[in-house]
Amino acid sequence: MEQEVAIDENEIKQMCNLFKVLSSPIRLRIAYYLSKQDYCVEALVHALNEKQNLVSHHLSVMKQNGAVDSYRNSRYTYYRLKPEVSQLLNRKN
């Protein structure tokens, strides 16, 4: 090894938790869509061709585990992927 790199245990735990959250196929599909733009539940339901309660449940799990943020715009709640998650998914190397 050229150089030893110290591993931050908290960062490792956070990444493991994120990988667990994204290990569900539907949550990974949601993350893919959210990596492109912000979506409301209704738009994700249409894009994923899944039931509203299922999409809402998985978004809730993702939000509780720090993968997404939400904000209200008019009568809709929009979801966005957190930047660090987006960077991880879009990493080329």
Image: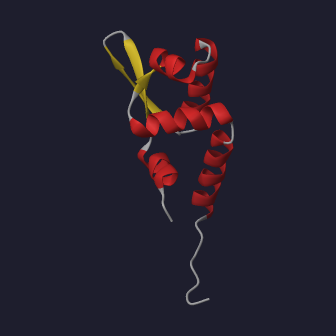
The image quadrant that residue 21 belongs to is top right
Determine whether 92 is above or below 75 in the image: below
| Count of residue discs | 0
Q: Residue at x 49, y 47 (%)?
A: 85
Determine whether 73 is above or below 10 in the image: above
The image quadrant that residue 28 belongs to is top right
Point out residue 90 in the picture as x, y percentages from the top left corner.
Answer: 47, 52
Point out residue 9 in the picture as x, y percentages from the top left corner.
Answer: 63, 63
Q: Residue at x 44, y 41 (%)?
A: 82
- Of 78 and 29, the residue lying toward us: 29
Q: Is residue 5 left or right of residue 86?
A: right
Point out residue 68 in the picture as x, y percentages from the top left corner.
Answer: 49, 35
Determine whether 44 is above or below 18 in the image: above
Furthest toward the bottom, the residue is: 2
Q: Is residue 18 left or right of residue 74?
A: right
Point out residue 89 in the picture as x, y percentages from the top left corner.
Answer: 51, 50
- Of 82 and 27, the residue lying toward us: 27
Is residue 61 at all visible to an observer of this figure? yes
Q: Residue at x 54, y 32 (%)?
A: 30
Furthest toward the left, the residue is: 74
Q: How was the colour assigned to the protein in this rendering?
A: secondary structure
The image quadrant that residue 76 belongs to is top left
> The N terminus lies in which quarter of the figure?
bottom right
- Of 25 and 73, the residue lying toward us: 25
